[in-house]
């Protein structure tokens, strides 16, 4: 199949060739008219010169017997490159400028119609033949003077041949230019579309699951082509990251579901085949129930993340509320857990109300997840601090706990899906690793930021909210 560029190139070349052909035809007609005009003018000058000769030599006697006149007439014919005839008043040819004494023109006679036209005007110019004298078409100019009729002519094919030769040169040049243009355009197009071919090849490989290929930058690429290659490679990077995340997501979900499913199946099979005694079945059913609830939490969390990522925050659910009050209420729900670990709770919230406009339930869930996470990783009898302050038109809400420091290499991954810290630092290893990812998704859906710092046994999660009065 022909490429789009080649089709366009051939179309343009055909248009250019037809244009040059039309231009050549116009030039040929113009040049032919110019040569014809020049030829007629030259014939008129020659007639004038020969007439002067006849007037000069006619006074000395009969012109056909005057050899000086013959010589002068032949010289004038050679200089003007024309045929010259001298006829008597009846139209019979008496003298021919050629040097052949037996010239066939001497037997000729002008046609009666030509003589009548000449007698009416005294001077006649036309293109045609003289029956009995010339058989080929000629440019003819004749004048009747005192001593007879002077006829000067030249072949018409000379002018036609010159104009036709010029046209053929122009035509061959146009064909050569078009052929060279197509050839050079074809080579240049192959050079120019090389990145497009590479991108097409990469796209085909994408379709077969290979997301590692990239288009290359080449020296001499245009700015538009460089931008296209860069955009294509950026798209490829995004597709590769998306595919990697999809694969990680499927692998992580499969892993998280595999463990409780294996546990549930094992206990149920044990109770059905009698391996587990009846006295232990209640404890086993409690384990099964706990694993089922864990799977339910995983599914709900994934559905919430999917809804938040696809729909964002519904503006109809936004409301104005006191951030400090919501933070305190969220903290109170963990009263029993706080007492179990005997944590020292510090609430650094200003007495003045700080209001924001956001999704209240979503922000409550953010605080719930952060506080729950802080309690899990706090040392017994450690500190848990909730603080709220205003900076640069934003509200900064922080949840701080004392405990093991998060390794620096894990900080960039802390908000990723299914990323879990070393379970040895947590008393609850049953989490699914989605809590902080949900936190980041909710905060991001509000157009705000969240970050974490951890050093010297202190870990602080901070997120922002807009401040309104």
Image (spheres, grey):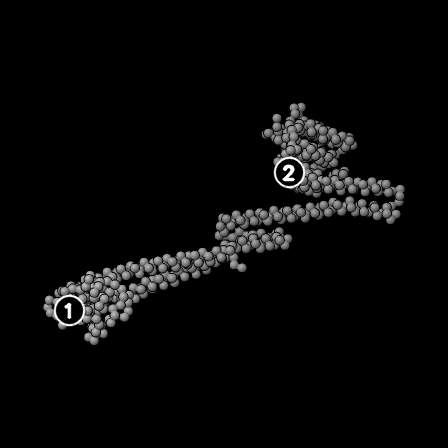
- Which quadrant, please, contains the C terminus? top right
**Within 10 Å of the Cα at label 1, are there few (<14), some (14-19), or many (20+) other Cα atoms?**
many
Q: Is residue 66 above or below residue 418?
A: below
State the image coordinates of residue 69 (x, y, percent, origin top left): 15, 69
Residue on which disc 1 sits:
69
State the image coordinates of residue 43 (x, y, percent, origin top left): 23, 63
Residue 312: assigned label: 2
Work out which residue is located at the far left of the displayed protein and give it. Answer: 60
- Which quadrant, please, contains the N terminus? bottom right
Q: Is residue 301 above or below residue 205?
A: above
Which residue sits at x=70%, y=34%? 365
Q: State the count of labels.
A: 2
**Within 10 Å of the Cα at label 2, are there few (<14), some (14-19), or many (20+) other Cα atoms?**
some
State the image coordinates of residue 266 (x, y, percent, origin top left): 82, 47
Q: Is residue 101 above or below residue 240?
A: below
Residue in front for this viewpoint, 73 or 424: 73
């Amino acid at each position: 199949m022909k490429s789009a560029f080649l089709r366009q190139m051939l179309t343009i070349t055909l248009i250019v060739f037809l244009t040059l052909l039309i231009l050549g035809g116009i030039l040929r007609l113009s040049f032919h008219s110019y040569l014809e005009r020049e030829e007629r003018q030259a014939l008129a000058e020659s007639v004038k010169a020969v007439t002067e000769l006849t007037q000069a030599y006619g006074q000395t006697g009969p012109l056909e017997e005057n050899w000086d006149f013959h010589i002068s007439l032949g010289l004038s014919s050679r200089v003007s490159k024309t045929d010259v005839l001298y006829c008597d008043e009846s139209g019979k040819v008496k003298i021919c400028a050629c040097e052949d004494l037996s010239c066939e023109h001497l037997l000729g006679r002008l046609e009666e119609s030509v003589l009548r036209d000449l007698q009416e005007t005294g001077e006649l110019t036309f293109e045609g033949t003289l029956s009995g004298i010339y058989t080929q078409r000629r440019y003819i100019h004749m004048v009747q003077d005192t001593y007879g009729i002077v006829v000067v002519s030249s072949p018409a094919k000379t002018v036609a041949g010159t104009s036709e030769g010029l046209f053929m040169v122009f035509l061959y040049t146009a064909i050569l230019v078009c052929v060279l243009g197509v050839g050079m355009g074809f080579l240049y197009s192959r050079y120019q579309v090389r990145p497009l071919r590479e991108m097409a090849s990469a796209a085909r490989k994408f379709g077969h699951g290979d997301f590692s290929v990239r288009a290359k930058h080449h020296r001499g690429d245009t700015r538009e082509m460089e931008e296209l290659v860069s955009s294509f490679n950026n798209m490829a990077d995004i597709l590769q990251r998306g595919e990697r995340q999809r694969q990680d997501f499927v692998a992580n979900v499969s892993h998280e579901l595999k463990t409780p499913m294996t546990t549930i199946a094992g206990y149920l099979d044990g109770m059905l085949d009698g391996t587990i005694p009846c006295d232990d079945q209640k404890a086993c059913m409690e384990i099964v129930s706990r694993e089922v609830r864990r799977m339910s939490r995983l599914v709900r969390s994934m559905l919430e993340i999917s809804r938040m990522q696809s729909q964002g925050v519904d503006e109809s659910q936004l409301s104005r509320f006191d951030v400090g009050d919501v933070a305190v209420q969220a903290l109170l729900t963990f009263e029993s857990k706080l007492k179990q670990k005997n944590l020292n709770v510090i609430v650094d919230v200003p007495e003045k109300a700080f209001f924001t406009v956001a999704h209240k339930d979503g922000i409550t869930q953010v605080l719930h997840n952060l506080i729950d996470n802080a309690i899990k990783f706090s040392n017994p009898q450690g500190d848990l601090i909730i603080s709220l302050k205003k900076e640069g038109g934003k509200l900064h809400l922080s949840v701080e706990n004392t405990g093991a420091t998060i390794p620096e290499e894990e900080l960039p991954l802390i908000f990723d899906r299914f990323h879990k810290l070393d379970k040895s630092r947590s008393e609850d290893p049953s989490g699914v690793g989605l809590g902080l990812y949900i936190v980041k998704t909710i905060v991001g859906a509000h157009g705000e930021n969240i970050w974490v710092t951890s050093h010297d046994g202190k870990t602080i999660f901070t997120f922002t909210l807009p401040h309104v009065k």
